[in-house]
Amino acid sequence: MVRHWKLSHHENFSRMRLKLCPSLTFSQHTDASNLRDNTGWLSRMQSEEIPLSFNLASAVVRGETEEDNSLEEELRLVSEAENEGPENSGKEKLILSQECELVTLMSVVKGRLDLTTSHVYFYDLSQLKDDVERQDFKWALSQLREVHLRRYNLRRSALEFFLTDQTNYFLNFSTKTRNKVFTRILSLRPPSLYQYGSRSPADLLRSSGLTQKWVNREISNFDYLMQLNTLAGRTYNDLSQYPVFPWVLADYTSQELDLNNPASFRDLSRPVGVVNPKNIPEVKAKFDSFEDPSGTIAKFHYGTHYSNSAGVLHYLVRVEPFTSLHVELQSGRFDVADRQFHSIPQTWKLLMDNPNDVKELIPEFFYFPEFLKNLN
């Protein structure tokens, strides 16, 4: 009988991850609980440095990032690929082989991508470990539905692949290598490929017709927002670029919600930090009074972001693998109980009272109620 569960990476057509699968390597995180509670027999461990083994480096905000390529160069990629004829002559042959990294929530796996005339292969080149499953995979080019240029750690160096079976893969390369892989894949003209992100998100949105479909009520609010997230480069595979959904309601205390009362809804014309008008003077004062002596940092209204790794893990702490990621982010311990996510009304109240906390929501609020339960 299965006792412990984790969230599966499988998605449905609306990009909802609804499936729980058995967690065969489940941990009670007893040490993390003891460290949080300052249990005496673990006091020695509190002074030890606990390495971050998971993919949390992308949570670090870097002050300066060198852009390797201009957007104009990326916009030329498709036309270059379309000028090359298809190379598939019936017999599978190797087109290119490149070192890369498979980026997942739990790890960054060094490997090699082999592109042939009919398949994509990824070979896991990380060190063999008995308790770690290998990440090798293979899929046919005929399964490729979408491929998008992505950023990783603020560099334009990644590709995200979406397949017809609703799986997806996020691979990081060097920038020049990424562009080469992208053009070679397009030159093979995969038969199921109907969308590729070589243009700016704004251009992709205009050409997609999504907004008109939403206006005509041909797609739901959720589908529209999720597609906007995807076009903007947000992904389930990277906590620092996790999909963002807005707070919609403003009434979390009434026994019955009056949907005809505008006061029941959040004002979407304002950032969440100033939805409460009382916070506007403080936010303006912060902007007006800030001066960086070095002249490097520009004035800003908010010192935090509406979406970051810590915020995602704050909401999903009850569901594996996010529980383990939360422990890693907190240097091997659980955060103190008073700071844990335990109440939607209380979280909304804190946002309204504190303009320094500007967290928006995540998609799971709109389709996955299990994340609110202590299933394990």
Image: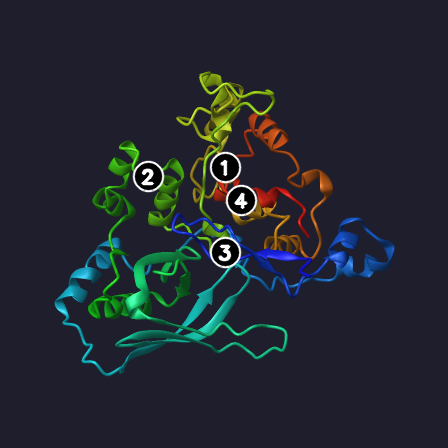
Q: Is residue 90 above or below residue 298?
A: below
Mark 4 lies on residue = 368
At a point 44% along the width and 46% down the height, the residue shown is: 243
Q: Amino acid at mark 3?
A: Ser
Mark 3 lies on residue = 58
Cβ–Cβ under 8 Å for marks 3 and 1: no
* Circle 4 or circle 1, nearest the eye: 4
Residue 169 percent coordinates (x, y): 41, 63
* Circle 2 or circle 3, nearest the eye: 2
Cβ–Cβ under 8 Å for marks 2 and 4: no
Q: Secondary structure at mark 4?
A: loop
At a point 70% along the width and 50% down the height, the residue shown is: 334
Residue 308 percent coordinates (x, y): 51, 46
* Circle 3 or circle 1, nearest the eye: 1
Residue 68 percent coordinates (x, y): 32, 61
Residue 210 seen in this snapshot: yes
Mark 2 lies on residue = 219
Q: Amino acid at mark 2?
A: Ile
Quote the CA–CA distance across marks 2 and 4.
19 Å
Residue 23 percent coordinates (x, y): 63, 61
Crowding near the residue tagged with mark 3, few <14, some 14–19, many ≥20 C-alpha atoms within 10 Å: some
Q: Secondary structure at mark 2?
A: loop
Q: Secondary structure at mark 3?
A: helix
Q: Is residue 360 above or below residue 45?
A: above
Cβ–Cβ under 8 Å for marks 4 and 3: no
The furthest residue to the front: 1
